[in-house]
Image (cartoon, rainbow, N blue to C red):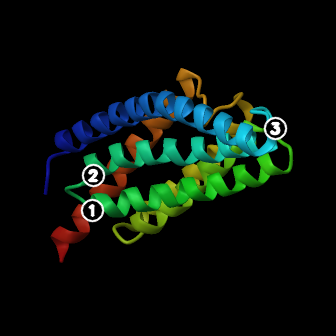
């Protein structure tokens, strides 16, 4: 069993990796999504400001950002669970968010708030499915993910274009929860 000090080093690394992935992944996905949506929207509708462009932008942004965050977090968790599993469930959550964002965009809306909520909820649910195999404490992950939805709704464009305080809160809360969940998983393995 590892020492509590190592657990909190993991928590600190989790917070730093998550913040970096959200920032870097957000900037990269913003530019890729904006360029791709503009080009496809122009090709399909003759304008890059139409419903198709907005839908593609919201969906691609959601998917790329969750892939970046999932890859970074999965790399850090690789000693606890396979990277492909964490990345897979995180991208699946992003795909749920992307699907909802695509629907909203095609209906003529360009609400980033709806895309934000879809991404928050989608990733919390899909990540919980993998974490519940390791610890009964994983329900806290799902509860925290759902509890963060009002935060996402009350911050302008929070999941896709996050203010720094939201990134900090997300990183701190998920770091604490991840350490707590992994501690119980290790204790359970040691007792067997």
- In percent of width and height, residue 161 lies at 60, 28
Looking at the rendered structure, the secondary structure element under dot 3 is loop
The residue under label 2 is 77
> What numbered label is drawn on residue 162?
none
Answer with mark 1 or mark 3, whichever residue precedes in sequence: 3
Q: Residues within 10 Å of mark 2 (few under 14, many from 20)?
A: some
Q: CA distance from mark 2 to mark 1?
A: 6 Å
Give the quarter of the image for residue 1.
Answer: bottom left
Residue at image coords 36%, 66%: 135
Q: CA distance from mark 1 to mark 3?
A: 42 Å
The residue under label 1 is 81
| Viewer-nearest of discs 2 and 3 | 3
Does the residue at mark 2 contact the one at mark 1 (Cβ under 8 Å)?
Answer: yes
> Is any part of residue 177 visible from this angle?
yes
Answer with mark 2 or mark 3, whichever residue precedes in sequence: 3
Q: CA distance from mark 2 to mark 3?
A: 40 Å
Q: Quadrant of the C terminus?
A: bottom left
- In percent of width and height, residue 137 lies at 42, 62
- In percent of width and height, residue 150 lies at 71, 41
| Viewer-nearest of discs 1 and 3 | 3
As displayed, is residue 97 above or below residue 116? below
Looking at the rendered structure, the secondary structure element under dot 2 is helix
- In percent of width and height, residue 82 lies at 27, 62
Q: What is the residue that sits farthest to the top in this orientation?
A: 164
As displayed, is residue 3 above or below residue 189? above
- Between 147 and 124, the one nearer to me in the picture: 124
The residue under label 3 is 50
């Amino acid at each position: 069993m590892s020492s509590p000090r190592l657990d909190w080093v993991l928590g600190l690394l989790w917070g730093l990796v998550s913040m970096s992935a959200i920032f870097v992944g957000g900037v990269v996905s913003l530019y890729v999504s904006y360029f791709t949506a503009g080009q496809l929207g122009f090709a399909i509708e003759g304008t890059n400001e139409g419903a198709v462009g907005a839908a593609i932008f919201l969906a691609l942004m959601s998917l790329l950002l969750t892939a970046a965050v999932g890859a970074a977090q999965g790399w850090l968790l690789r000693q606890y669970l396979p990277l492909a599993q964490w990345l897979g469930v995180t991208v699946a959550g992003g795909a749920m968010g992307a699907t909802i964002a695509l629907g909203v965009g095609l209906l003529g809306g360009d609400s980033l708030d709806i895309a934000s909520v879809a991404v928050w909820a989608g990733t919390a649910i899909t990540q919980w499915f993998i974490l519940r195999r390791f610890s009964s404490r994983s329900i806290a992950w799902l509860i925290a993910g759902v509890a963060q939805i009002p935060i996402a709704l009350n911050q302008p464009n929070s999941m896709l274009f996050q203010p720094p305080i939201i990134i900090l809160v997300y990183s701190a809360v998920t770091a604490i929860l991840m350490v707590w969940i992994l501690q119980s998983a290790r204790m359970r393995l040691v007792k067997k």
